[in-house]
Image (cartoon, grey):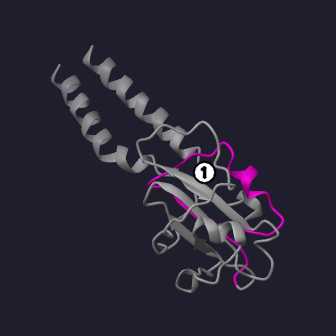
């Protein structure tokens, strides 16, 4: 009986320590295509749920493209002129999603933005349920750009969130069985 109790306590402690970290996901913008012109990022966003704590990763050829966080009006106009302090150009830019709300990103090279190299996402609170539909880029409003990037982390699939949820349910079930 004591070993069953100890297993339950250990499971609860493990869940409370691990749970805040396992829900984060890394999204590679454009998946295998990466951050390029002539790609439909609006369609790419559909069905994806971005939450505070997730990261979005822009992968592209360094020097050929860049990533500029902008407000809604600049996004709509493909205007990067006011964003000189926040131009990212490493080819592997990791943007942590630290706040909920709309986020807009464009490429400031040549006519890349006009050719579709722009992304708008809506970030939900970490504990929020997924929104029923993808964001629409047609209703921009002013927003402050996200904070500076963190060093790159190894990319993971957004399915990580589902896998970790299943693991947590399995651990909880094991704890209940151990108590019986």
Residue 12: percent from left, percent from top: 26, 35
Q: Is residue 24 left or right of residue 176?
A: right
Q: Which residue is drawn at the image coordinates 74% and 82% (left, top)? A: 109
Q: Which residue is drawn at the image coordinates 57% and 68% (left, top)? A: 71
Residue nearer the viewer, 87 or 73: 73
Q: Is residue 29 left or right of residue 170?
A: right
User: Is residue 144 shown above or below 140?
Assistant: below
Q: Is residue 82 left or right of residue 11?
A: right
Q: Residues within 10 Å of mark 1 (few under 14, many from 20)?
A: few
Residue nearer the viewer, 39 or 91: 39
Q: Which residue is drawn at the image coordinates 51% and 65% (left, top)? A: 143
Q: Which residue in the structure is indicated by mark 1?
A: 157
Say which quadrant the C terminus sits in.
top left
Residue nearer the viewer, 89 or 144: 144
Q: How many marks?
A: 1
Q: Magenta stretch? A: 35-62
Q: Which residue is drawn at the image coordinates 60% and 36% (left, top)? A: 132
User: Is residue 150 shown above or below 124?
Assistant: below
Residue 44: percent from left, percent from top: 72, 52
Write down the quadrant of residue 131 in the picture.
top right
Is 38 magenta? The answer is yes
Say which quadrant the N terminus sits in.
top left
Residue 150: percent from left, percent from top: 47, 72
Is 80 magenta? The answer is no
User: Is residue 94 shown above or below 140?
Assistant: below
Q: Name the element at disc 1.
A: loop
Q: Is residue 150 left or right of residue 139?
A: left
């Amino acid at each position: 009986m004591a070993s069953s109790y100890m297993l339950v306590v250990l499971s609860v402690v493990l869940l409370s320590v691990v749970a805040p970290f396992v829900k984060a996901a890394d999204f590679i913008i454009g998946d295998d295509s990466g951050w390029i012109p002539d790609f439909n990022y609006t369609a790419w966003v559909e069905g994806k749920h971005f939450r505070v704590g997730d990261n979005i990763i822009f992968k592209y050829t360094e020097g050929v493209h860049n990533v500029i966080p902008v407000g809604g009006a600049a996004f709509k106009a493909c205007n990067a002129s006011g964003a000189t302090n926040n131009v990212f150009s490493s080819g592997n830019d990791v943007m942590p999603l630290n706040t909920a709300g709309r986020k807009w990103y464009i490429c400031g090279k040549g006519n890349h933005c006009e050719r579709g190299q722009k992304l708008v996402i809506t970030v939900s609170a970490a504990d929020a349920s997924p929104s029923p539909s993808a964001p629409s880029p047609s209703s921009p409003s002013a927003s402050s750009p996200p904070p500076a990037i963190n060093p790159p982390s190894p990319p993971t699939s957004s399915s990580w969130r589902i896998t970790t949820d299943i693991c947590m349910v399995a651990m909880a079930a094991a704890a209940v069985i151990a108590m019986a």
